[in-house]
Structure formats: structure tokens, C-alpha cells
Image (cartoon, grey):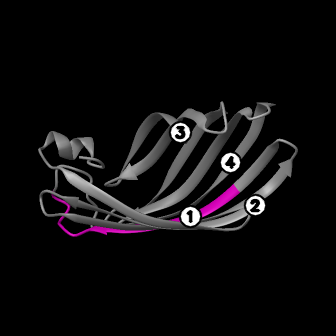
């Protein structure tokens, strides 16, 4: 099922996820977002989280920009932590990130842009204290027409889970086709 962690799936636990979010734009340089997400696990556990943030354009010149983002997250689970998947009773994170982006090439509706993001935060989990978290990501976006685009990139995260620092590498590709 969508949203189920691989560790849970390997133990025969499935989950359904849901989320509801909103974003408000003051203008093209400032926006705020809020998102509530949840998961219902087949073992009876219920996960609920709230994520909010604000993004501000800090610098812009021609095709280059730098955005700053401040964010906060709080969440928790209804069942005890004795699960075959990451299941903190209560957790919170406060952090910020900087994103540098630029348009590398443009020809009418076609454009290639890229962005690099570096983020730092403090992550706290009940019974494990607060520890630092770090992330870095790079991606490109190719707008081939006004109806078709492809985004791709990779990222690295270092964050604590149950008091131990863990590294995660991720790769993504996303195609959008408006019809």
C-alpha cells in the first residue's frame, strides 16, 4: 500500500496514508504552507503529523535566486514503540534551509533549470533527546513544452532515529503531463 515503510511491509504490516495541505502566497517571493498527514497501519497504530513552514526569497538577479525556508514538524503514534518499523511516541523538528536555483537555458516554452538545497534542523524524539539533522539535495527541471516537464535529482539526509544517526540517499524522477 502507498506510504508503507519497507521495514513494516517486510513484517507484513501495511498502511494507508492521507494528507491535507494548503499554501498561501503573499507574492512570488513569499509563501507559507501547512500540511496535516496521517497513516493507518494494519496493526492498529495511527500516526499523525503536522508540518508548517514559510519560504522567503532572499536574493534574486536575472535568472538566479536564493530562497530561505523555516519549518516546524510535530508528530506521534498511538501505539507503543515496540513495532517492526520506526514508530516514535512523540517527535518534533525545527529547522531551516537555503535553496539556490537558476535557469540554465531557455528557448520560448523550453527551459532547463536547477536547484541545490542545504538544510539543518534539530530533531527531538521522546526518550532520545534532541540531535542535529542535515540534508542536501540537487535537482534539475526540464520544461519541454507548456504541457510536459521532467524533474530529476538526488539527495542525502543524515538524521537520528531512536537516538542513532542514519544516512539516507534518495534519487527521484517526476514527469508531469497536462492534458
- Indicate the secondary structure of the residue bearing disc 4: strand
Image: magenta residue range: 68-82
The 10 Å Cα crowd at callout 2, few under 14, some 14 to 19, many 20 or more, is: few
Residue 63 colored in magenta in the image: no
Query: Sequence-wise, which precedes: disc 2 or disc 4?
Result: 2
Q: Tell me, for residue 176, which label it has, or none.
A: 3
Q: Quick check: 150 above or below 65?
A: above
Q: Which residue is mark 4?
A: 99
Q: Which residue is mark 2?
A: 29
Choose top left, top right, bottom left or bottom right for residue 144.
Answer: top right
Q: Picture coordinates of residue 163 (x, y %)?
A: 35, 54
Q: Quick check: 166 above or below 40?
A: above
- Which mark is nearer the camera, 1 or 2? 2
- Indicate the secondary structure of the residue bearing disc 2: loop
- Which mark is nearer the camera, 1 or 3? 3
Identity of the residue drawn at 27% across and 46% down: 5
Identity of the residue drawn at 72% across and 54% down: 67
Q: Which residue is mark 1?
A: 71
Choose top left, top right, bottom left or bottom right for residue 76.
Answer: bottom left
Query: Sequence-wise, which precedes: disc 4 or disc 1?
Result: 1
Query: Sequence-wise, which precedes: disc 1 or disc 3?
Result: 1
Using residue 2 as the reference point, say whether residue 116 is left or right of it: right
Identity of the residue drawn at 60% across and 35% down: 149
Amino acid at each position: 500500500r502507498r506510504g508503507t515503510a519497507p521495514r513494516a511491509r517486510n513484517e507484513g504490516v501495511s498502511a494507508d496514508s492521507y494528507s491535507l495541505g494548503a499554501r498561501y502566497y503573499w507574492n512570488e517571493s513569499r509563501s507559507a504552507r501547512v500540511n496535516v498527514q496521517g497513516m493507518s497501519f494494519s496493526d492498529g497504530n495511527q500516526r499523525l503529523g503536522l508540518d508548517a513552514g514559510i519560504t522567503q526569497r532572499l536574493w534574486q538577479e536575472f535568472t538566479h535566486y536564493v530562497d530561505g525556508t523555516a519549518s516546524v514538524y510535530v508528530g506521534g503514534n498511538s501505539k507503543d514503540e515496540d513495532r517492526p518499523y520506526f514508530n516514535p511516541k512523540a517527535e518534533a523538528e525545527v529547522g531551516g534551509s537555503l535553496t539556490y536555483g537558476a535557469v540554465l537555458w531557455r528557448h520560448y516554452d523550453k527551459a532547463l533549470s536547477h536547484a541545490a538545497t542545504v538544510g539543518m534542523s534539530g530533531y527531538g524524539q521522546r526518550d532520545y533527546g534532541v540531535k542535529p539533522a542535515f540534508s542536501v539535495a540537487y535537482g534539475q527541471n526540464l520544461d519541454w513544452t507548456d504541457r510536459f516537464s521532467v524533474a530529476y535529482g538526488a539527495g542525502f539526509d543524515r538524521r537520528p532515529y531512536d537516538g542513532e544517526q542514519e544516512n539516507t540517499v534518495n534519487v527521484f524522477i517526476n514527469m508531469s503531463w497536462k492534458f
